[in-house]
Image: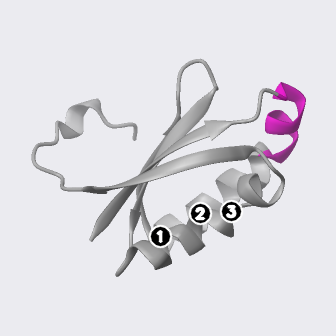
């Protein structure tokens, strides 16, 4: 099942920039494991959307809580929604 996390970041831009490399390394590992379907920050860097591939909401939340952004306090709040991919324009996805 896929779980979309709509995440709000701290307003501390320096902390976001400091931790971002570790956060992206973590996500790349989860992509390789098949646990993250897609992710990306909102344009204003006030938050992000991450879609987890997990067997349960509890597993998805554990993946989020183990993220360096969460551990460092960059993620200040989040909401999960069950997400179903219906359509996808692969030409618009990053390489």
Q: Could you tell whether 14 is left or right of 44 in the image?
A: right
Side of 18 where 82 appears, left or right: left
Residue picked out by circle 3: 67
Predominant secondary structure, magenta span: helix
Label 3 secondary element: loop
**72, 26: nearer the viewer:** 72
Q: Residue at x 39, y 37 (%)?
A: 94
- Give, as a single range, the part of the protein colored magenta: 12-19
Q: Is residue 73 visible?
A: yes
Q: Position of residue 36 (x, y in %)?
A: 44, 63
Q: Is residue 94 left or right of residue 87?
A: right
State the mark number for residue 60.
1
Give percent across and percent down for residue 30: 53, 69
Circles 1 and 2, Cβ within 8 Å, touching? The answer is yes
Question: In which image quadrant can residue 20 be found?
Answer: top right
The residue sitting at 80% across, 49% down in the picture is 73
Q: Nearer the viewer, mark 1 or mark 3?
A: 1
Q: Is residue 94 above or below residue 62?
A: above
Q: Determine whether the residue tagged by mark 2 lies in a helix, strand or loop.
A: helix
Q: Which residue is mark 2?
A: 64
Residue 88 position (above or below residue 65):
above
Give me the C-alpha separation between circle 1 and circle 2: 6 Å
Decide: is 27 above or below 35.
above
Q: Quadrant of the C terminus?
A: top left
The answer to whether marks 3 and 2 mark residues whose Cβ atoms lie closer than 8 Å is yes
Say few, some or many: other residues with alpha carbon within 10 Å of mark 1 (under 14 / 14 to 19 / 20 or more).
Answer: many
């Amino acid at each position: 099942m896929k779980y979309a996390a709509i995440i709000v970041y701290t307003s501390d831009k320096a902390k976001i920039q400091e931790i971002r490399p570790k956060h992206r390394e973590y996500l790349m590992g989860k992509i390789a494991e098949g646990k993250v379907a897609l992710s990306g920050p909102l344009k204003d860097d006030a938050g992000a959307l991450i879609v987890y591939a997990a067997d349960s909401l509890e597993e998805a939340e554990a993946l989020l809580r183990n993220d360096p952004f969460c551990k460092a306090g960059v993620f200040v709040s989040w909401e999960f929604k069950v997400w179903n991919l219906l359509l996808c324009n692969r030409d618009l996805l990053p390489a």
